[in-house]
Image (cartoon, rainbow, N blue to C red):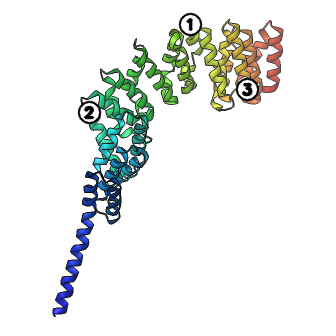
């Protein structure tokens, strides 16, 4: 009985000793850190982590030691692990580093937040970022927007808060917001109020906002197709931003077929340089995007312009694209009514190459062959009829 009591007491004392030691690793490390004995502090924090003794804060404190010694890579590795373990203080530290003077530190902060795998931690990060965005401290908002811009992850969960800052009186905040928008283009372009505000920025006198809006639309690529007419107008009327606007147009790509329907009328009052640039965008897509074949009839209308450079570019682009798609047959038939001989002859060639698929062109071609006084057109139309019938 005495032996049993002795063993029980021994086990109790042993357990108390183990628990006490376990709890002392973190405290000892903290004491060493306070006294400036950093190597010992890191050693004991490491033991605390192994034993699960306040591991999250231990990782964070090791990170602080490395940070204070400018060993930033090691510091942010520790901060990342600390956040994964649930430390909000490490999270706050990393977010604050977004405004640090050293660009490398700012980049590491964004990279650390981007690499967090814990779903719960990511939600907390977004909550903290949103809280800063709702503050009245413009400097903190700007720094936080910079972190969000650099985040290598989907930031659409906080899109509403970011979009709201488009109304800020601070121009830098607006600029930062415009830089972030391409991270969730479908949301931005699907929000008419937001999209229209960006379009309005294109007419502002402030060059910083204007150029940021141009870049924003270009970086949203095909999602911003409805901005093409406005960007082309900017290119036509604003020599300073012409190249930037045309680069944005090239990124967005070809317009919708509805927008292309009146292409000739739209470009009639635009400088010849703009016409050539737009034609080259189509030419650059030749062989890369089959949809460009649907625009052959629209490109043919550029042959109406009198400028030799525009006409030659149109011919070159048509050669690059090659045969039009069968979907364009009705449009090609409609072009047979044009007064421009080159347009009519090219439309006839295209229709002839379709063979029997272009049977709807038989009657119009017969009419041309029977009424035209142009011997070349008559021969081309007759040859096309033979291919189609």
Q: Counting other residues with Cα less than 10 Å from the Cα at mark 3, is it few (<14), some (14-19), or many (20 or more)?
A: some
Disc 1 secondary structure class: loop
- Farthest bottom residue in view: 1
> Against 194, is 346 above or below?
above
Answer with left or right where residue 135 lies relative to residue 334: left
Answer with left or right where residue 112 lies relative to residue 219: left
Give the residue pinned by disc 1.
Answer: 269
Q: Quadrant of residue 359?
A: top right
**Residue 208: percent from the left, percent from the top?**
42, 18
Give the residue pinned by disc 2.
Answer: 134
Q: Residue at x 31, y 33 (%)?
A: 161
**Residue 12: percent from the left, percent from the top?**
20, 79
Give the residue pinned by disc 3.
Answer: 322
Q: Residue at x 31, y 21 (%)?
A: 170
Query: Which quadrant of the figure contains the C terminus?
Result: top right
Answer with left or right where residue 288 lies relative to residue 201: right
**Residue 184: percent from the left, percent from the top?**
43, 35
Q: Counting other residues with Cα less than 10 Å from the Cα at mark 2, is it few (<14), some (14-19), or many (20 or more)?
A: some
> Against 55, is 387 above or below?
above
Q: Residue at x 66, y 26 (%)?
A: 284
Q: Nearer the viewer, residue 12 or 219?
A: 12
Q: Quadrant of residue 172?
A: top left
Considering only order in the chain, which callout, 2 or 1, is on the residue closer to the N terminus? 2
Q: CA distance from mark 1 to mark 2?
A: 46 Å
Disc 3 secondary structure class: loop
> Against 295, is 236 above or below?
above
């Amino acid at each position: 009985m005495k032996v049993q009591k002795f063993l029980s007491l021994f086990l109790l004392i042993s357990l108390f000793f183990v628990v006490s030691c376990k709890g002392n690793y973190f405290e000892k490390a903290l004491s060493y850190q306070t006294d400036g004995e950093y190597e010992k502090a890191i050693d004991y924090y490491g033991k605390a982590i192994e034993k699960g003794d306040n591991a999250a804060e231990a990782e964070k404190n090791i990170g602080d030691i490395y940070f204070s010694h400018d060993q930033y890579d090691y510091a942010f590795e520790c901060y990342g692990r600390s956040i994964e373990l649930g430390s909000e203080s490490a999270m706050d530290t990393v977010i604050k580093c977004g405004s640090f003077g050293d660009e490398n530190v700012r980049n590491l902060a964004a990279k650390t937040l981007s690499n967090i795998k814990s779903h719960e931690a990511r939600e907390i990060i977004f909550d903290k970022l949103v809280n800063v965005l709702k503050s009245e401290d413009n400097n903190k908002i700007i720094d936080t927007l910079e972190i969000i811009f650099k985040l290598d992850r989907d930031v659409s969960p906080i899109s509403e808060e970011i979009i709201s800052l488009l109304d800020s009186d601070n121009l830098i905040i607006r600029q930062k917001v415009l830089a972030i928008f391409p991270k969730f283009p479908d949301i931005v372009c699907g929000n008419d109020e937001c999209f229209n505000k960006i379009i309005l920025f294109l007419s502002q006198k402030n060059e910083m906002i204007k150029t940021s809006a141009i870049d924003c639309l270009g970086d949203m690529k095909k999602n911003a197709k409805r901005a093409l007419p406005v960007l082309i107008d900017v290119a036509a009327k604003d020599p300073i931003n012409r190249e930037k606007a045309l680069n944005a147009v090239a990124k967005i790509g070809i317009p919708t077929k509805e927008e292309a329907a009146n292409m000739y009328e739209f470009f009639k009052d635009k400088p010849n340089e703009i016409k050539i640039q737009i034609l080259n965008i189509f030419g650059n897509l030749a062989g890369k995007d089959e949809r460009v074949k649907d625009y052959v009839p629209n490109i043919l209308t550029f042959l109406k312009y009198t400028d030799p450079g525009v006409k030659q570019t149109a011919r070159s682009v048509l050669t690059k694209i090659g045969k039009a798609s069968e979907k364009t047959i009705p449009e090609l038939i409609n072009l047979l009514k044009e007064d421009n001989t080159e347009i009519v002859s090219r439309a006839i060639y295209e229709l002839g190459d379709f063979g029997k698929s272009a049977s709807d062109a038989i009657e119009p071609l017969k009419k041309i062959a029977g009424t035209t006084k142009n011997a070349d057109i008559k021969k081309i139309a007759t040859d096309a009829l033979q291919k189609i019938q």
